[in-house]
Amino acid sequence: MAASTAPISKSGLYADPREDWLAQYTEEIIDPGRPIVDPHHHLWDRGGLRYMIEEMAADIASGHNIVATVYVDCRSMYRAGGPEAFRPVGEVEFANGVAAMSASGGYGKAQINAGIVSHANLLLGDAVKSVLEAEIVAGNGRFRGIRHSSAWDAEPAVAGMYATRPKGLLLDPAFRKGFACLEPLGLSFDAWLFHPQIGELADLARAFPDTKIVLDHCGGPVGLGRFAGKREETFKVWKASIQDIAKCPNVHVKLGGLAMCLLGYDFHLRPRPPSSDEAAAAWRPYIETCIEAFGPGRAMFESNFPPDKGQCSYQVIFNAFKRIAAQYSEAEKTALLSKTATEFYRLQLA
């Protein structure tokens, strides 16, 4: 195997995208007319890395029929001043501005940022309500919910940038006071965590059965640190957790995030990017387990770009998803690739 030149991001959990490396491999688009809603991507311009509307539009233009996308919290464009609690409102203002740019038609036909998920510090308890209300206003009808990352692990090799986050966040009484503000405002919660923490989210979901929750990135199965080289053993534990939380009817799942380094695959270290066949073979057990547990009506494919772009192109990631979805009925394919996301985020598609 050739020596890697793939830079690992500061998060420690994914490789930074390399356009020259990705350009070494392209493939024909499978089922190019099928509408897709991409319910999870980020936009940022920081640390010398840029992934903004131009880059997103270029990836979409590579062939899949993306009709709409959902922007998800990544601490992008927070306000530089003002009260700390309200600084994430800047991210909503930014994401809504990008949505307005997209609505001009100048960046393709896809409705980029048709839905917006930002952040609010739920540890503020009842006081977070005023922040959420400000974000609703800033979203101009597009704001749909928040993500307050609870990813944590005692081992730095697993935790990466989340090593300093609090343990047991989802169980914290102050956090739960803040969480209680979501449902009355019609807002959902995106949950980003590692697979040993899925049980904590299940406890939260059962405590708030009327709050809509989506489990990001297949529940964050880990293949790094103490989990390295233990894929089969880890898979059994992860699968049991997925089957348990799927019993909560208010929880959905996003199918993706598997092209981050977190899972333990080395696609970013190889001389050539993976094909969709290779990617599908690696991800199929995780995605099929999630679909079997949640059903297509509570599962949605996501790009998680640009983090997942470190291991594959936009062409490849959705071709891989389409390969995995090939066994399902037309109605189920529609749910997995567009309908579930549209309904969960209440998107108003043109």
Image (spheres, helix red, strand yellow):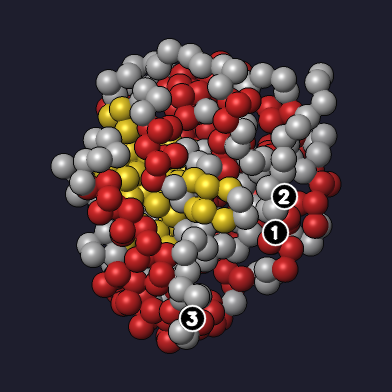
User: Which residue is disc 1 drawn over?
Assistant: 161
Q: Nearer the viewer, residue 293 or 176?
A: 176
Q: Residue 269, percent across and down?
A: 74, 28
**190 left or right of 100?**
right
Question: In the rendered view, would you say 128 is above or below 235?
Answer: below
Q: Residue at x 29, y 65 (%)?
A: 139
Q: Nearer the viewer, residue 327 or 164?
A: 164
Which element is circle 2 on? loop
Q: Residues within 10 Å of mark 1 (few under 14, many from 20)?
A: some
Question: In the rendered view, would you say 219 is above or below 132?
Answer: above
Q: Residues within 10 Å of mark 3 (few under 14, many from 20)?
A: few
Q: Residue at x 68, y 61 (%)?
A: 162
**59 left or right of 263?**
left
The CA span between labels 2 and 1 is: 7 Å
Which element is circle 3 on? loop
Please state which amino acid type lies under the numbered disc 3.
Gly
Q: Which mark is residue 12?
A: 2
